[in-house]
Image (spheres, rainbow, N blue to C red):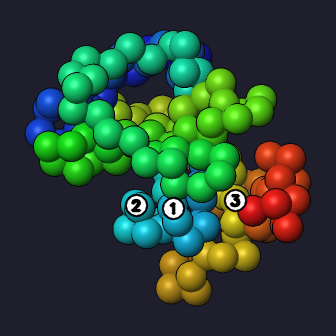
Amino acid sequence: MSERTGGCMCGAVRFTATDVPATFGACHCEMCRRWAGSAFLGVSVPVSSVTWQGEPHIRTLQSSDWAERAWCQRCGTGLYYHVTDGPHAANYEIPIGILDDASGLDFTSEIFIDHKPAAYTFAGDRTRLTRAETLARFGISEEGE
C-alpha cells in the first residue's frame, strides 16, 4: 500500500489517497466503456483513505441501481466509480490515468471480459471474469440488474 496523489485535467479537483494497492484492473462493461472511451482501468481505494480538494466541482450520477460515477464539472474528467450499497461500497475505483504517478502498478484483473470488443486485447496473464462471474462476485443476480 502506498500514498498517491492525482486530479482532474483542469486542476479544479485534486486528491490524496493512502492505502492504495499496487494492483489495478480493467472493466469492459458497456457503461464503463462509454464513460472511459475504452476499457475502464481503475485502482480500488478505500473511501476513507481519500481526501478531496475542490469538492464543489465534483458531480455524481447514480449510473445504476447499485453504483455512482463522479467527474469534475469544469473539465469532465472522470474521478471515480463507486458501488453505493453492500460490502463493496467501502471503495472507490479511481482511474489510473488521473494519478500523478501510476508507476509500479500491476495489472491483475479484467471483468466483463465477455463484453470486451474484439478490436483490442491486453497482453499478459491475469484473472479474467465474465459478466455472470462479475455480477456473482458483487452479489447481484442477472435478473436484479
The residue at which mark 3 appears reads as 111
- Coordinates of residue 46 in the picture (x, y in percent): 59, 21
Q: Residue at x 51, y 48 (%)?
A: 62
Q: Which amino acid type is marked by label 1?
A: Cys
Q: Which amino acid type is marked by label 3?
A: Ile
Q: Residue at x 48, y 68 (%)?
A: 33
Other residues around mark 3 within 10 Å, as few (<14) / some (14–19) / many (≥20): many
Other residues around mark 1 within 10 Å, as few (<14) / some (14–19) / many (≥20): some
Q: Which mark is residue 77?
A: none
Q: Which amino acid type is marked by label 2?
A: Ala
Measure the alpha-carbon separation of dots 2 and 3. Answer: 15 Å
| SS at mark 1 in the image | helix
User: In the rendered image, which quarter contains the C terminus?
Assistant: bottom right
Query: Could you tell whether 35 is left or right of 91 in the image?
Result: left
Q: Quadrant of residue 51?
A: top left
Please, which residue is most extreme toward the bottom here?
Answer: 118
Does residue 6 lie above or below 108 as drawn? Answer: above
Q: Which mark is residue 36?
A: 2
User: In the rendered image, which quarter contains the N terminus?
Assistant: top right
- Coordinates of residue 39 in the picture (x, y in percent): 50, 64
| SS at mark 3 in the image | strand
